[in-house]
Image (cartoon, rainbow, N blue to C red):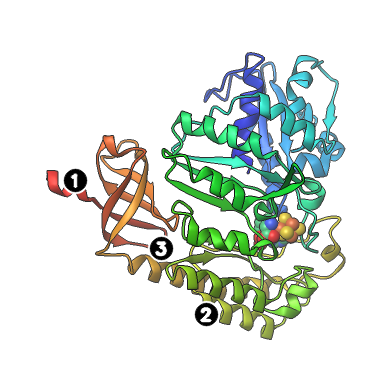
């Protein structure tokens, strides 16, 4: 979502004459968009600002803006800790950035961290989305009401708020016109999307069905979804939609019901298994990926073993795993995290299982023909980059004219993260 937000911040400041540059040493305004999900992210921000400060030791400093969730959570603290920062602006207030930049006065610090999501959605509606990637992001929902005990999102992004249906479709049309052939619908809880039009609730399934109608659009994805919002209408889309990809990032966090309860996840392992079995009944090739938190306060070896068991059972591909990071203000921060050596050892064990699943899955595609949406030519190489239906990177010998198209690629090799091969039409030409 930060990629999407950064693009939109740029679309907004463009209106008052700003342009993007790679020349970091000579800018009028520097915006860092930040994430606060784990502790390291905040330290990275201060580290990055330290680096920028060095570039401006002997010259006029740019207006330094810190946007995003670190700005939201730390606001005044950031301004105090780092005087080089001029403006902090939260993720639900960035639509006010032009006003702030226009009124900017040296030595006056600005702090804008209201939860103004509706006003933000309103402004975004009026500003064209200039993203011209083959695979584009589109925010449909922001915020979260679920309050998992480890998570800062409800505090930094605010309550769940869904964008109006027609605004999303209009923005999708813009993206398609700009060349998008794949759209990933975004939200902190994307499948909690809920918008009422004429007393009728519209859900993410309605958005998927509507997007399905655009012939230029080849693929639809969504992320990140929560197991309790995997409702029957959405699961149904996997049988009705031809464009919805058979790969879902559906975080479970832990394979132990005891830990899920301590986390306030509101779902059990059995609910997750039930969703999985319904999905593979519709399409046996559907794959899931997940997020896992290791070393949550109270996690015992038996809980961890249940997580490993689940990984073996579901055979997740492309998952993310993190050591629990205590976040200020969250319920779990009142409890002691697990000993860090134990957590690290468990993470290594868990990741080796996840990576093995990934390697095995990629290997299973070698010598097969797969469908790849071609995104770009790899700079300085005579190769092309695209993704298969499971969102794996595919690097292959292809043709310039394939960019933006779905082509068949014969997979010749694989590693943990990527597949390598040759476009079928390239083989004929050779
Ligand atoms: N809404 C999504 C997740 C959004 S946060 C869901 O409910 O599944 C993205 C991921 O960051 C989470 O899935 C979780 O695995 C990780 N995460 C969030 N807070 C964390 C914390 N305090 N420590 C470690 N990982 C965390
Ligand atoms: Fe955070 Fe996701 Fe839980 Fe919301 S549902 S609190 S975003 S982990």
Closer to the camera in the image, 129 or 331:
129
CB of mark 3 within 8 Å of CB of mark 1?
no
Q: Earlier in the sequence, mark 2 or mark 3?
A: 2
Which numbered mark, 2 or 3, is in the foreground of this view? 2
172 vs 204: above or below? above
Q: Is residue 24 left or right of residue 109?
A: left
* Neighbour tally class for label 2: few under 14, some 14-19, many 20 plus, Cα within 10 Å: few
- The residue under label 2 is 313
- The residue under label 3 is 416
Which numbered mark, 3 or 1, is in the foreground of this view? 1
Label 2 secondary element: helix
Label 3 secondary element: loop
Q: Earlier in the sequence, mark 2 or mark 1?
A: 2
Closer to the camera in the image, 400 or 49:
400
- The residue under label 1 is 426
Q: Is residue 39 left or right of residue 179?
A: right
The image position of residue 281, as x and y in percent, is: 49, 73
- What is the quadrant of residue 275 in the picture? bottom right
The image position of residue 322, as x and y in percent, is: 63, 63
Q: Is residue 366 left or right of residue 161?
A: left
């Amino acid at each position: 979502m930060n990629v999407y937000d950064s693009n939109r911040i740029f679309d907004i400041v463009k209106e008052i004459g700003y342009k993007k540059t790679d020349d970091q040493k000579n800018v009028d305004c520097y915006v860092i968009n930040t994430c606060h999900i784990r502790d390291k992210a905040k330290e990275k921000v201060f580290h990055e600002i330290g680096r920028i400060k060095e570039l401006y030791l002997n010259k006029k400093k740019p207006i330094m803006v810190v946007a995003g969730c670190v700005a939201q959570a730390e606001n005044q603290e950031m301004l105090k800790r780092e005087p080089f920062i001029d403006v902090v602006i939260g993720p639900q207030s960035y639509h006010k950035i032009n006003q702030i930049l226009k009124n900017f006065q040296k030595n006056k610090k600005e702090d804008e961290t209201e939860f103004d999501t509706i006003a933000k959605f309103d402004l975004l509606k009026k500003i064209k989305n200039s993203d011209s990637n083959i695979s584009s992001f589109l925010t449909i929902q922001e915020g979260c009401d679920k309050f998992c005990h480890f998570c800062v999102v409800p505090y930094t992004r605010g309550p769940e708020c869904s964008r109006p249906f027609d605004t999303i479709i209009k923005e999708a049309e813009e993206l398609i016109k700009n060349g998008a052939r794949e759209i990933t619908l975004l939200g902190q809880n994307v499948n909690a999307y809920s918008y009422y039009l004429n007393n009728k609730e519209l859900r993410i399934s309605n958005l998927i069905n509507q997007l399905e109608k655009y012939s230029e659009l080849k693929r639809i994805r969504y992320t990140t979804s929560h197991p309790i919002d995997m409702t029957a209408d959405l699961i149904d889309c996997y049988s009705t939609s031809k464009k919805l990809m058979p790969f879902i990032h559906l975080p479970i966090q832990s394979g132990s019901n005891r830990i899920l309860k301590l986390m306030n996840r509101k779902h059990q392992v059995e609910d997750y298994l039930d969703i999985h079995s319904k999905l593979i009944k519709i399409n046996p090739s559907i794959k899931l990926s997940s997020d896992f938190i290791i070393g949550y306060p109270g996690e015992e070896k038996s809980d961890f073993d249940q997580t490993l068991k689940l990984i073996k059972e579901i055979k997740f591909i492309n998952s993310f795993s993190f050591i629990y990071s205590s976040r200020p203000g969250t319920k779990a921060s009142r409890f002691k995290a697990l000993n860090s050596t134990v957590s690290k050892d468990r993470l290594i064990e868990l990741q080796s299982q996840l990576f093995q699943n990934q390697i095995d899955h990629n290997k299973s595609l070698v010598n097969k023909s797969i469908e790849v949406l071609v995104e770009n030519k790899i700079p300085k190489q005579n190769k092309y980059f695209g993704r298969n239906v499971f969102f794996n990177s595919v690097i292959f010998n292809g043709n310039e004219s394939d960019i933006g198209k779905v082509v068949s690629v014969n997979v010749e090799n694989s590693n943990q993260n990527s597949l390598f091969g040759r476009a079928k039409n390239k083989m004929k030409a050779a």
